[in-house]
Image: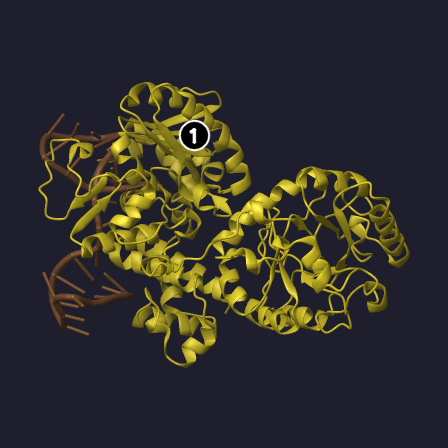
Chain colours: A yellow, B brown
Amino acid sequence: MERAQIVEILEEIAVLLELKGENAFKIRAYQSGARALESLENDLDALIEANELVKVSGIGKALAEKIATLRQTGELEFYDKLKESIPPGLLDMLDIPGFGPKKIRKIHDELGVETLDQLTEACKDGRIEALPGFGKKSVENLLRGIANREAYSRRHLWWNAAKVASPMLEQIRALPEVIRAEAAGSLRRGRETVGDLDFIVASDQPAPIMDWFCSQDGIEEVSAKGETKSSIRMQGGLQADLRVVPDSRFVFALHHFTGSKDHNVKMRQRALARGYSLSEWGLFDKDSERDATAPQWQRPLAVDGVQTEADLFNALELEWIVPELREGLDELELAEKGRLPELIEETHIRGSFHNHTNASDGNATLEEMAAAADALGWEYLGIADHSKASFQANGLDETRLLKQVEQIRELNASGKFKVHVFAGCEVDILKDGSLDLDADVINQLDYCVLSVHSSMTGNSEAAMTERFLKALDAPVTIPRMLGHLSGRLLLRREGYAIDTRRVVEEAARQQVMIELNANPHRLDMDWRHWRAAAEAGVLCVINPDAHNTNGFDYIRAGILSARKGWLTPDKVFNTRSLAEIKTVWNLS
DNA sequence: GCCGTTTTCGGCCCGACTGTTTTCAGTCG
């Protein structure tokens, strides 16, 4: 069984155990075990073989056995039995905000409610309201939650969430009572999808800020409004949380709500080991008495002068860890040694290689794309329109492609634009692993991007992997890049099953670059694979896959993913100057 | 179920807000 599937099963076990009312720490163990497996950088089969899975932090004897069984047999009796014991409708109920495992169990045990329909029924006929611990409000919230369950539980592309968050943050900062404000959460960490928005604000006058926040245009519902925290639900289902704290506590709150959960747990453990206790309200002496009647922000801090997150990390003898790296991997260990990488930044990018024109399915001309690249100050622009097999995308056959190459050469010679245009093509990898253009045609280009656009479903992992390996065996002599390796479309379509490790190894061996497709729907190859890939010697190329001149903006999303993948500028090809590239590509 | 510079048991990060209570459980992050 695929590793990603095993991760899903472990996560599902955690949910099922919750519904069973199991020990909360046992549930957490399954959740953190799932994350440990997900971010594992070694070869899973080798670890199982050597009995070394238990050495992975977060995976103990019981989980190691279950993971090995799933990997080798694809089945797990423990999981099957657990699943059988819980009506599937109860899992759906977890998507209802404010309705958790304990309440679900209660209505199940007391009323025999097993499905969302039965739950609606029980709300309407008064049986829920009659239960102890439930009331009128509960029923209202339940009915609204059921009606909007899908929209409320949906995650959102980072790109779309950022588009909502940026103007909101600007408006918050413009409020007179606000000293400073930041967006936190998975948005700040640059995750590919975002569950909700988190804003952290420093101010001594929270009330007017809360009032403004909860009365903005486009709000569907105010789900919480308190002294330090408010939550709103916006049209479309996106939730936004606002937290207002005194300026002296701002960085603690910002750090805490930036997360991730795993990173925070490690930070707190580190604090405890140094005699401190860390929370969103500050860094305190572990043994200091907490006056339960006084607000948290009045509790004296253990360390003075913590004004920035860097100060907070320093107080725990760590160098500053950028938000993108706070995923609870080994960032603390490296920060302790001062060995965190200098990550790539947007300003390092000098061009890109996977872009379309209206010759295939783009909607800007070659010249319009070149002009837009010029305006960005890029030194080079690679055009890689679709090849003929991508019929639906008006892919180019040999004749049209070679004509486009000529056009590009002429454009460069004309000196009309400052940007140098490289002639490429996004060549289809066909079902049998062959390329849909002859190698002697491809070899007339400056470079090519090899991508899968067809027969994506119904193939085994082995077959898909072979398909890529065979494509790499074609007698192509020009520089190559593998395009959007998994074929995933975030929140819409899973990537196909593929042995990424093997493809990465082969790409490294043949010096083939792998693309980080920066389209916010793709962000493919996934950031979780980049650290190992770069260590294996694979060069990354961050490509916007632009289909119009606005598409170049996607680079921003790609940079974030690259940073999450620990990539430094030297590991990313399109940080190089035009002169360097011409040299390594033997172009005059 | 995991983990260990107080190790094989007994901890496990910590606090805000809501709704239904009259002191707190449940949920969420």
Circle 1 sits in a helix, a strand or a loop, which is it? strand
Residue B15 position, x and y percent, is 22, 38
Q: Nearer the viewer, residue A276 or A102?
A: A276
Where does the image place residue A23, in percent across and percent down from the top left? 24, 56
Q: Which residue is drawn at 22% across and 52% down?
A: A271
Q: How many marks?
A: 1
List the single residue furthest toward the bottom. Answer: A50
In the image, is A423 to the left or to the right of A300?
A: right
Q: Residue at x 71, y 42 (%)?
A: A373
A411 lies left or right of A215: right
Residue at which label 1 appears = A233
The residue lying toward the viewer, choosing from A148 and A556, is A556
> In this orientation, does residue A460 appear?
yes
Quadrant position of residue A465: bottom right
Percent position of residue A73, x then y: 47, 75
Placement of A560 over or under A13, stated as above or below: above
Which quadrant does the C terminus of chain A fall into? Answer: bottom right
Question: Compared to A189, does A436 lie above or below?
Answer: below
Which chain is mark 1 on?
A
The answer to whether one can see residue A22 in this image is no
User: How far from the left and from the top, in percent, is residue A229?
Assistant: 30, 30
Amino acid type, mark 1: Arg
Image height of A530 relative to A204, above or below? below
Residue at figure coordinates x 34%, y 23% from the top left: A210
